[in-house]
Image: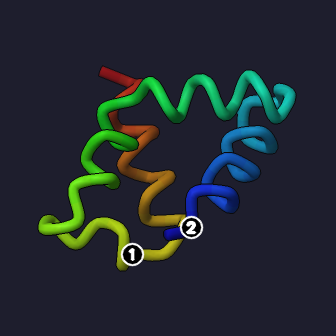
Amino acid sequence: IQIHRVINLIQEQENIGFEEATGKFYHSQTYKTLTQVENGLWAENAEYILDRYNEEVQK
């Protein structure tokens, strides 16, 4: 799972610290989906997962 890379990308994108980015990602629906192994999101690259996260937070 590319969780650490996704968090780093959120940090860069939003210009925030690691702890804040971690909190935002861990409380997102994207993270919850990522932890459900059967859906296969965990197999995607970090950029794809970031795109899913961005779609979620823009709603």
The answer to the question of whether label 2 and label 1 lie on touching residues, with beta carbons closer than 8 A, is yes
Q: Residue at x 67, y 41 (%)?
A: 10
24 relative to 39, above or below:
above
Residue at the spot 42% in from the left edge and 41% down from the top edge: 53
Viewer-proximal residue among 45 and 26: 26
Task: Sort mark 1 into few (<14), some (14-19) or many (20+) by Cα contacts within 10 Å.
Answer: few
Q: Position of residue 20 (x, y in %)?
A: 73, 22
* Disc number for residue 59: none
Please tell me which residue lies in front, 45 or 22: 22
Q: Residue at x 68, y 61 (%)?
A: 5
Q: Earlier in the sequence, mark 2 or mark 1?
A: 2
Which secondary structure lies at badge 2? Answer: loop
Residue 20 placement, left or right of 59: right
| Mark in the foreground, 2 or 1 | 2
Considering the numbered disc 1 on the image, is that residue within a helix, a strand or a loop? Answer: loop
**Residue 39, above or below 4:** below
x, y percent for residue 27: 45, 24
Query: Around disc 2, counting alpha carbons within 10 Å, would you say few (fewer than 14), some (14 to 19), or many (20 or more)?
Result: some
Residue type of the residue flagged with mark 1: Glu
Real-space CA distance between mark 2 and mark 1, rounded to the nearest whole angstrom: 8 Å
Task: Report the amino acid beneath label 2.
Answer: Gln
Which quadrant is the C terminus positioned in?
Answer: top left
Q: Nearer the viewer, residue 38 or 28?
A: 38
- Which mark is on residue 44? 1
Residue 34, image quadrant: bottom left
Query: Where in the figure is residue 44, as x and y percent of width and height?
Result: 39, 75
The x, y position of residue 50, in whole percent, is 50, 52
Q: Which residue is mark 2?
A: 2
Q: Is 11 above or below relative to 27? A: below
